[in-house]
Image: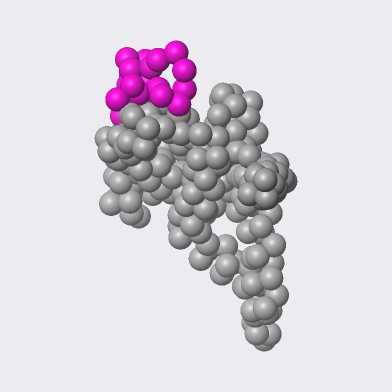
């Protein structure tokens, strides 16, 4: 069956979801274009004050709504595509989802850089990385988690009951493996293609920095 026929079959099966996916493409594309145009028209020499009207502690509501709209549209669209691929090839869907969600999360970080809702620092970008990662993971689980869990619990031998604990254990291993791959792809894309301010701070570096600041604070108090 050709891709065109598969697309027609998917549209006949769930027209509302298919139309919503198309709308998601338009929203994501429009949001990215607006962010790119805003970045070029309002950018200054240094970051994080990309938008000159974002004062210290200020908030740009337009950019915030733009980022949220882009993230939801592109992530729901990607999850929909993954679910479509999983109906035909479950193993291919796993690897496709890793690549697709990594790119989706990276593009959301790019959106935040192009149209920041507030003045950002590297620690703030680290928090944004976490929010994007967990948010996209939850959306993918909502769309694809049930089918994967049913497949893991399925038993070909009808005389035996499904091993629920074993299936849940395998699902957790699969989830952590998938999450590790996605996080690695998301951070490596960011570290390679975007400025240093967008790079997530490693956990060991963050904890050591915190310990150093606490030591300095205590020593200053003793003085």
Residue 204: x and y, percent? 72, 46
Q: Residue furthest front?
A: 223
For the residue pair 62 and 166, the one nearer the viewer reads as 62
Q: Is residue 169 left or right of residue 144?
A: right
- Give the quarter of the image for residue 165: bottom right
From what the image shows, is residue 31 above or below residue 168?
Answer: above
- Asked if residue 147 lies in the magenta stretch, the reply is no
Regarding residue 128, the answer to whether it shows in the image is yes
Residue 90: x and y, percent? 60, 53
For the residue pair 176 and 39, the one nearer the viewer reads as 39
From what the image shows, is residue 183 above or below residue 190?
Answer: below
**Magenta region:** 27-53
Residue for point 65% across, 65% down: 172
Q: Is residue 206 left or right of residue 4?
A: right
Quadrant location of the C terminus in the rendered image: top right
Q: How is the image coloured?
A: one colour
Residue for point 46% across, 34% down: 120
Residue for point 59% across, 33% down: 199
Regarding residue 189, the answer to whether it shows in the image is no
Picture mark count: 0
Residue 16: x and y, percent? 28, 51
From what the image shows, is residue 69 above or below residue 119?
Answer: below
- Asked if residue 42 lies in the magenta stretch, the reply is yes
Residue for point 55% across, 40% down: 123
Q: Is residue 60 left or right of residue 135?
A: left
């Amino acid at each position: 069956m050709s891709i065109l026929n598969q697309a027609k079959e998917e549209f006949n099966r769930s027209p509302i979801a298919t139309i919503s996916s198309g709308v998601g493409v338009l929203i994501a594309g429009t949001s990215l274009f607006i962010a790119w145009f805003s970045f070029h028209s309002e950018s200054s020499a240094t970051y994080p004050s990309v938008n000159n009207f974002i004062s210290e502690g200020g908030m740009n509501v337009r950019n915030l709504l733009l980022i949220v709209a882009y993230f939801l549209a592109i992530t729901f669209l990607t999850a929909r595509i993954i679910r479509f691929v999983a109906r035909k090839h479950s193993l291919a869907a796993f690897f496709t989802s890793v690549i697709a969600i990594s790119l989706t999360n990276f593009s959301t970080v790019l959106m935040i850089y192009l149209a920041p809702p507030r003045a950002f620092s590297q620690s703030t970008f680290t928090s944004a990385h976490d929010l994007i990662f967990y948010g996209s993971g939850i959306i993918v689980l909502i769309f694809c988690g049930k089918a994967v869990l049913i497949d893991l619990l399925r038993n070909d031998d009808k005389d035996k009951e499904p091993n629920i604990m074993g299936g849940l254990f395998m699902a957790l291993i699969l989830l952590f493996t998938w999450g590790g791959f996605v996080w690695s792809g998301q951070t490596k894309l960011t570290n390679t293609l975007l400025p240093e301010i967008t790079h997530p701070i490693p956990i060991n570096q963050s904890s050591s920095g915190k310990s150093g600041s606490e030591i300095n604070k205590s020593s200053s108090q003793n003085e």
